[in-house]
Each structure stands twice: as structure tokens, then as C-alpha cells.
Image (tube, rainbow, N blue to C red):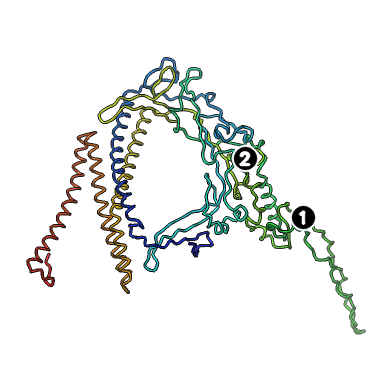
């Protein structure tokens, strides 16, 4: 394929895969859709049943903690059992993390990136400036036939994983991602740091009175702490890379000059060396032209002459020598004089030198090619204000809470999850709750109850919607046949398009209604059965509502069937005469 569209200037191209794929929801392979629905439907019903059971069991665990967890102080001596406390954290108990801790098996020393900080948890985020390809596939119709159209669009952006480009589309990508002209493909990530997000955690830290505190292990706090960016300003002297920032300042200074300057251009690869700096040429100095000398008029003898005012010679200004202009950086050259606006509006590609892997896509990152960004929270191989293909940005976050509140089992100052007893429909499980700040036990448990209820409703919605989609997929062969009939009807002159849309629309609406009715009825029935098992009183009411829905659907089906049988009996009573009118 490879049909270009009107959006080529925005980086979008299309591939057309012609075929007899169906529309109207049937898809090009209704058998696969039907099989997917048959597998998806019971899975969604299982999720709904598990969700209801988990909701009841989690509420039981919260009620157990509310009744049995006692409040204790911040001194660990003599404290034991299932308890709650809210205390300040001892900062000296935090672990010191280095960059090597976040790049295990990749970075082999702490000299390449000499950064360290203290906390309970640490994370590293590495991203690279790349050409990003986006594919969008849609089903379209042309000349009465369905076709699959894949659109390719390209843009430059930051990504935490290596973006792959479709090989045959790279020539198109080069028109948007200009650095690909020399790079060919997106360059790989540096080999001495892990791409994306890398995290690590301390084994434990302490909270409470110094010297008599509680030890909180990672099994209690892991994943429950907030993060803050690590300030890298104290380490800026160790990093000397990313020299492009100085060129930005030079270009900005040149653009601010008021008199006309020369255009900044970049020589293409293989071009001759840049021309020497040519100072602006001023017109030669010319003295002003003086008026002719004064000539006294000839007057008659009997008239006294009028004496004019004395002549004053004009003041000629002294010649002005233009101030010398400093030559531009080595990466640019000056040509014929042009207005300042041409320099001020120059594009990124004009202001930067040609792309090279050594300069913009290093194989390793270290103190020689990294520099602390202006904000102080990021390391970069080139300025993020005007990045180039392959530029790398590193940032770090740390979790270092000042106060914590915990509900857990305490034994000799050591915290561990509490084993809750089993109950009807619920097995025994471990319970612990951790949050930052000094939060009371009642507020912590109320927050847990609210979160449990919210997650239950989210899973209910997802489960019912998934069951609806599954039943629709099971019935996809029907919509596929409607689409094929519509393709045939489309050949009827004048009304073909209308009839095709009408048939496909009606069949799609009927299938959608049937799938919605079946999926909702089955979902409510499964949820009700779980509640009958867990809480019989609530479950009985829930089951009654579900059965009423099923009965209403069955009654509607029986009524429709009865109307059809009555119609056939009436026709048979009239001798099967098709010309006889039908009375309903």
C-alpha cells in the first residue's frame, strides 16, 4: 500500500488493505469475534462474582481492625499486639541510594553519575527524544467494498521506551523528523542506564522516639509513599556536558541587535567550509553640497539697498565609524545582509548543526556529556528547550515522609501484617494499613471503607460492560451477514445506499439491545447469587430484582411469539390467500 492523503503536510499517510471485510460491528472475521466472546463472557461473570465476594470480605477485615486495633504512643518499649500509632520518622534511619542502586546489572560504578540521596524509596526516570509513529486502523467502504485503512502519523517527542518505525515508512517520517535523514532510525538508549522507570526500596526505616522507635519494614510501606523530585543542583559542578545551552544565548544576543545582520544558515552535509565573516558595507561618506555664494542685487540710485542677514554656513556632521560586530559561533556562518526578523524567526533546523550520533545520541551517559538542567531537577545530554533526536533526560524521585500512621501487629518494636481470622465465605488474610501524616485510626478505616466501595463499583461497571461486549461479539455473525446483504443491496440504483444503511442500522440496533438485555440479566443474577451466599437477606432482595428482569424479558419474548402464531393461524383460516388482509 502507500496511498498519500491530504494530510501529508502534517505527517499522516495511509495504507489500504482491500478486502471483503464486513462492517456494522461484524468485523472481517466474525468467527474470531464469536470465539472471543465465548471466552470473554464467562470471564466477566467470574470477575463480577469475585468482586462481590471481595467487597464483603474486605469490609469484614476493616470491621475487625476497628474492633481490635488499640492506640499506642510513640515509644516502642512494652508495646505489643494489634495496634495503631502516628509518629514522626527518624531521618537518620533512611537509606542512602545511589544511581547504581537504580541500575543494577547495567551501571557498574558510581563515578559515571555521582548522585546520591536518602529516603525510604527511590526511583529513576529515563526518557529519550525520538520520532514517534502512531498507527490508526479503520474500516472504510469504497466502491461498495470494505477495506482496512491504516494511517501513519509522525511527531517528535519524549518516550521512555525505544520507538520502532515501520521500515517502508521511514522516508515519510523523515519529512517530519528531519534528524532521521542522517540517523536513519531512532538511536538506541545508552547502555549504562535502564530505560523507563526503575525503582528500589529500603529494607526498613524507623518512626517514634529516637532510640526507642518502631521499625517499619518494606512489606508495610511499599507502594504507599508519595514522591518528590530530587534536587540535582548540588551536583551541577560534577557535570560538564550539554554545551548547546551557550549557543542559545549567543543566538538570542544576535537576534536582539537592532541594525540589519546576516542570515544564519547551516551548511548541508558535504558542503564547502563556511565563508569568512563579512562586515556590513556602509556607503562612502560624502560632504554636503553648499548653496551658491550670495549675490547682492542691483538697486537704483534713488533707493537705499536693503542689507540681508549675514550668511551662516551649515554645520557638517563628523564621520561616524560603525562599531565592530562580534563574529557568530563556529556552528553558524553569515551571508549577505538581511533584516533582523529573518534571524529572529529562524527554525530549529537552521540554528543547529547537522545531526551526529556522537554529539546527540551517546552510547553511554556520564559527567562529560550530562548537565543539570536549568530547573535543577533533571540531567540532560542536550538542552530540553530545543532537543534533538537521541537527546536523553534523567530525573530522580525520592520518598522521605516526615510522619506516618500505621495499623499493624507489633512485636518487640518490629511491625508485621496482622493475620485476621476466617469467616463465612471469607478465608483468613493479612491486614496492615500505612499512610503518611498523623491520621487517626477512625479516619484511616473510613478511608479504607470508601476506597473499597469505589473499587467495587468500578469493577461492577467494567464487568457488566465487558459482558455486554462479549455477548455482542458472540452475535457478530448476524451483523456480518447484515453487512453482506447491505453490500448487495448497495448496487440498487438511487436507493442502494439508503437501504444498505437502513439494514445494517436496524440489525445492529437489535443485536445491541439483545446483547445488553442478556448480559445485564446474567450479570445481576451472578451478583445476586454471591450475595445470597455471603449475606442471605440482602442477596434474596437482589436475586428477586434479577429474576423480575429475566421474567420481563421472557414475557416480552413470549408475547412476540404469540403474536406471530396468531398471525399465521389467521392466514391459514383464510385459506392461505396471500391477498387477504392481515388483522392484528
Tally of marks: 2
Q: In the structure shown, which secondary structural element does the residue marked by tag 2 occupy?
A: loop
Residue at image coords 50%, 65%: 6
In percent of width and height, residue 460 lies at 31, 43
Residue at image coords 41%, 58%: 138
Among the 4 quarters of the image, the one containing residue 291: bottom right
Quarter holding the C terminus is bottom left
- Within 10 Å of disc 2 (Cα), the crowding (few <14, some 14-19, many 20+) is many
Q: Is residue 74 left or right of residue 188?
A: left
* Foreground pick, 93 / 471: 471
Q: Answer whether labels 1 and 2 touch (C-beta < 8 Å).
A: no
Mark 1, mark 2: which one is toward the viewer? Answer: 2
* Foreground pick, 154 / 222: 154
Q: Is residue 15 left or right of residue 55?
A: right
In percent of width and height, residue 387 lies at 60, 49
Question: Which labelled disc corresponds to residue 66?
Answer: none
Check disc 1 and report the residue beneath it. 325
In percent of width and height, residue 114 lies at 62, 33
Residue at image coords 31%, 43%: 43
Task: Name above or below for residue 34 compared with residue 140.
Answer: above
Q: Residue furthest right?
A: 301
Q: Residue furthest left?
A: 573
- Within 10 Å of disc 1 (Cα), the crowding (few <14, some 14-19, many 20+) is few
Q: In the structure shown, which secondary structural element does the residue marked by tag 1 occupy?
A: loop
In percent of width and height, residue 402 lies at 49, 28
Task: Measure the C-alpha gap from mark 1 to mark 2.
Answer: 38 Å
Q: Which one is earlier in the sequence, the residue at label 1 or at label 2?
A: 1
Check disc 2 and report the residue beneath it. 365
Amino acid at each position: 500500500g502507500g496511498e498519500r492523503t491530504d494530510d501529508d503536510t502534517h505527517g499522516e499517510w495511509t495504507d489500504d488493505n482491500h478486502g471483503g471485510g464486513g462492517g456494522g460491528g461484524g468485523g472481517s472475521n466474525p468467527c474470531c469475534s464469536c470465539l472471543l466472546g465465548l471466552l470473554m463472557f464467562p470471564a466477566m461473570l467470574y470477575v463480577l462474582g469475585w468482586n462481590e465476594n471481595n467487597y464483603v470480605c474486605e469490609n469484614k477485615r476493616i470491621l475487625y481492625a476497628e474492633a481490635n486495633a488499640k492506640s499506642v504512643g510513640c515509644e516502642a518499649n512494652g508495646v505489643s499486639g494489634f495496634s495503631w500509632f502516628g509518629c514522626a520518622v527518624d531521618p537518620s534511619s533512611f537509606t542512602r541510594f545511589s544511581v547504581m542502586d537504580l541500575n543494577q546489572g547495567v551501571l557498574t560504578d558510581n563515578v559515571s553519575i555521582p548522585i546520591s540521596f536518602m529516603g525510604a524509596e527511590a526511583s529513576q526516570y529515563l526518557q529519550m527524544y525520538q520520532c514517534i509513529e502512531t498507527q490508526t486502523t479503520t474500516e472504510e467502504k469504497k466502491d461498495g467494498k470494505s477495506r482496512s485503512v491504516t494511517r501513519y502519523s509522525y511527531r517528535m517527542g519524549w518516550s521512555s521506551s525505544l520507538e520502532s518505525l515501520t521500515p517502508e515508512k521511514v522516508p515519510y517520517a523523515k519529512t517530519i523528523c528531519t534528524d532521521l535523514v542522517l540517523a536513519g532510525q531512532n538511536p538506541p538508549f545508552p547502555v549504562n542506564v535502564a530505560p523507563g522507570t526503575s525503582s528500589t526500596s529500603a529494607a526498613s526505616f524507623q518512626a517514634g522516639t529516637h532510640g526507642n522507635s518502631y521499625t517499619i519494614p518494606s512489606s508495610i510501606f511499599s507502594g504507599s509513599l508519595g514522591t518528590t523530585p530530587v534536587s540535582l543542583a548540588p551536583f551541577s559542578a560534577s557535570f560538564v556536558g550539554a554545551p548547546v545551552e551557550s549557543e542559545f544565548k549567543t543566538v538570542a544576543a544576535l537576534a536582539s541587535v537592532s541594525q540589519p545582520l546576516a542570515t544564519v544558515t547551516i551548511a548541508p552535509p558535504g558542503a564547502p567550509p563556511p565563508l569568512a565573516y563579512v562586515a556590513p558595507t556602509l556607503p562612502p561618506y560624502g560632504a554636503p553640497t553648499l548653496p551658491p555664494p550670495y549675490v547682492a542685487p542691483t538697486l537704483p540710485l534713488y533707493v537705499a539697498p536693503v542689507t540681508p542677514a549675514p550668511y551662516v554656513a551649515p554645520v557638517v556632521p563628523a564621520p561616524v565609524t560603525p562599531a565592530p560586530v562580534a563574529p557568530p559561533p563556529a556552528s553558524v556562518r553569515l551571508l549577505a545582509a538581511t533584516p533582523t526578523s529573518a534571524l529572529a524567526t529562524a527554525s530549529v533546523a537552521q540554528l543547529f548543526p547537522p545531526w551526529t550520533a556522537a554529539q546527540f545520541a551517546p552510547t553511554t551517559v556520564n559527567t562529560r556529556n550530562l548537565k543539570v538542567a536549568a530547573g535543577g531537577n533533571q540531567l540532560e545530554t542536550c538542552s530540553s528547550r530545543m532537543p534533538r533526536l537521541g537527546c536523553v533526560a534523567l530525573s530522580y524521585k525520592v520518598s522521605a515522609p516526615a510522619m506516618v500512621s500505621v495499623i499493624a501487629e507489633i512485636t518487640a518494636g518490629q511491625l508485621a501484617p496482622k493475620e485476621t481470622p476466617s469467616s463465612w465465605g471469607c478465608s483468613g488474610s493479612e491486614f496492615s494499613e500505612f499512610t503518611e501524616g498523623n491520621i487517626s485510626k477512625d479516619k484511616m478505616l473510613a478511608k479504607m471503607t470508601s476506597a473499597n466501595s469505589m473499587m467495587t463499583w468500578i469493577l461492577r461497571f467494567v464487568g457488566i460492560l465487558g459482558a455486554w461486549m462479549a455477548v455482542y461479539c458472540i452475535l457478530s455473525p448476524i451483523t456480518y451477514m447484515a453487512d453482506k446483504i447491505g453490500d448487495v443491496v448497495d448496487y440498487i440504483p438511487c436507493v442502494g445506499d439508503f437501504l444498505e444503511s437502513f439494514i445494517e442500522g436496524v440489525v445492529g440496533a437489535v443485536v445491541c439491545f439483545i446483547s445488553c438485555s442478556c448480559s445485564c440479566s446474567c450479570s445481576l443474577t451472578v451478583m445476586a447469587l454471591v450475595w445470597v451466599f455471603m449475606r442471605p437477606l440482602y442477596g434474596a432482595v437482589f436475586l428477586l430484582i434479577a429474576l423480575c428482569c429475566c421474567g420481563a424479558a421472557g414475557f416480552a419474548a413470549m408475547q412476540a411469539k404469540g403474536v406471530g402464531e396468531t398471525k399465521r393461524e389467521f392466514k391459514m383460516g383464510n385459506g392461505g390467500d396471500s391477498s387477504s388482509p392481515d388483522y392484528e
